[in-house]
Image (cartoon, rainbow, N blue to C red):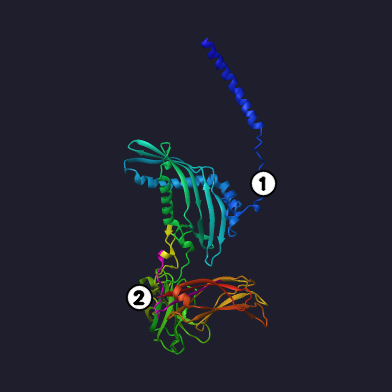
Amino acid sequence: MGLLSSLLGMIGFGIGLPIGLFIGFYLFVYSESEDVQDMESQPLCELDPVALEDLMPEIPLWVKSPDYDRVDWLNKFISCMWPFMEKAICNSIKSTAEPIFAEYVGQYKIEAIEFKNLSLGNLPPTVHGLKVSETNERELVMEPAVRWAGNPNIMVAVTISSVKVTIQLVDLQVFAMPRVTLKPLVPTIPCFANIVVSLLEKPHIDFGVKVLGGDVMSIPGLYRYVQERIKKEVASLYLWPKSLEIPMLDASTVAVKKPVGILHVRVIRATKLLKKDLLGLSDPYVKLNLSGEKHPSKKTTVKKKTLNPEWNEEFKLSVKDPQSQMLHINVYDWDKVGSHDRLGSQVFPLKTLVANEVKEVTLDLMKDTSISDANKKQRGQLFLELTYAPFREDNDSFSGALNGYSRKDSVMDRAMSNTSTTGAPGLLLVTVQGAHDVEGSRHNNPYVLIIFRGETKKSKMLRKTRNPMWNEEFQFLLEEPPLQDKIHVKVMSKRTSFSFYSKESLGHVDINLADVVHNGRINQRYHLIDSKNGVIHIELRWKTI
């Protein structure tokens, strides 16, 4: 009897359970409680700010800030390229990490460290907004808002005392606000020499670490400690104003050399020069210039009817590369009619000079410096005094090498006092970058006149444009800092054909040089006086010897 009752009980349970589940599912799906009411919909524009913040906590930056642009095209590009980018990034990570792993092999009883699996997953990072800034420098500044909630599978196998331990990185999330600067912009593909990356705020990095299958980040207190430690280390390296600089072009292809010192040349005298005039004498003078320079040569005065002239005249020439530049000296015989006859030439390498030391030089003049003067006729001698005076070093170097990856310290870390000693000589560099909206009433062929202490220098003329780009540099060698001086910059236009109104002023500006002396460099745009909307971009530098 007991067996029968047990059998019937099992049959009843087997039949009743499916029937009960079916009835319950039917009632759950097709029955509706009287207490349930339809939700009321409300437009977003009618919600208060608090409700909106609760509803959409992750509003994209291109919605919140007008400075940020929506870049769906960029996200689409990254999504299409991610399968290939992921492999390239993994290869780069592997090649970078393996030498670091090798340094730990043999320490702490570690026998081997290797990647068991390295994949960044199939979810690419997304850019939630991009801000592009315009500056006065030759650079392009971009500030993307990058978010990456990926599904990477990174497994590292560590063998310790013949025991293999597997460490797995999972659930990686990175939220960052980097500043990417492409500088300087150059006329060589890819049109920028360096990529400079810095972080505008501490990044948010979240991940899980599994060791032997267990998540060690779930240990109380460890998760917060690791998060804060990572933020602190990353911020100490790359948080603005510190940065990571990645070179893209070789320095030799893009380097623009700037003056690094002044060469003082004193032309003393010459002896036994060649006879070029009918009376057996000459009217000699000397021309000086440095190799690689386009500036006009320095000239001495003409000494009439002598073969042993004495000048005792001093000149200053700006030096860009004292290791490779040569001083070219040419002695000419002045003629009233026709070309001037060259009496002799010579070159002198600047690398033989010691900084701030006077060197007396006696040069044997030759007919041509490109050939040996063996068995050549004597052309006399020239006596010079040469002194190379380098500029004082400061944190704003004119040119720098691009040697691999480097981390740049902040300007505050590198800042040095740039005060100039009263009366110290120096070099004033005026670089006219370009102008915008300069418009003449009769013609638009703009050029620039730089007027300073009675000396006028002129840029090239650009035809038929209201937005000229000159990128020309002008130099002024001064005996003392121009603390009380102003430089006059005038934009002119000249008609290319004959006309009664051949020249026309498009605007001018007077720039006080005291700030340039105190700061060392100013790069600014100036509104032109007597111009409706004209703006000129000028860079000023003051280098003290």
Q: Amino acid at mark 2?
A: Asn
Quarter of the figure that contains the C terminus: bottom left
Point out the stretch of residues depicted in magenta. Answer: 413-433
Give whichever of 519, 128 is nearer the camera. Answer: 128
**Image position of 73 (left or right of 315):** right
At x 46% / y 70%, what residue is drawn?
Answer: 258
Q: Amino acid at mark 1?
A: Ser
Residue 381 counted in the magenta span: no
Judged from the image, the secondary structure of the residue bearing numbered disc 2 is loop
- Among numbered discs 1 and 2, the one appearing first in the sequence: 1
Q: CA distance from mark 1 to mark 2?
A: 83 Å
**Image position of 123 (left or right of 314):** right
Pinpoint residue 482: horizontal percent, then vertical percent. 46, 80
**Image position of 217 (left or right of 56):** left
At label 1, counting other C-alpha atoms closer than 10 Å, the crowd grade (few under 14, some 14-19, many 20 or more) is few
Query: In which image quadrant can residue 395 be found?
Result: bottom left
Query: In which image quadrant can residue 312 be found?
Result: bottom left
Asked if residue 16 can be seen in this view, the reply is yes
Judged from the image, the secondary structure of the residue bearing numbered disc 1 is loop
At x 60% / y 59%, what residue is drawn?
Answer: 66
Give whichever of 490, 153 is nearer the camera. Answer: 153
In the image, which disc is placed on residue 356? 2
Q: Which residue is mark 1?
A: 41
Whether 326 is drawn above or below 140: the answer is below
Pinpoint residue 516: horizontal percent, then vertical percent. 47, 75
Asked if residue 404 can be seen in this view, the reply is no
**Could you tell me if the residues under marks 1 and 2 are in contact, i.e. CB atoms within 8 Å?**
no
At x 49% / y 63%, what residue is drawn?
Answer: 254
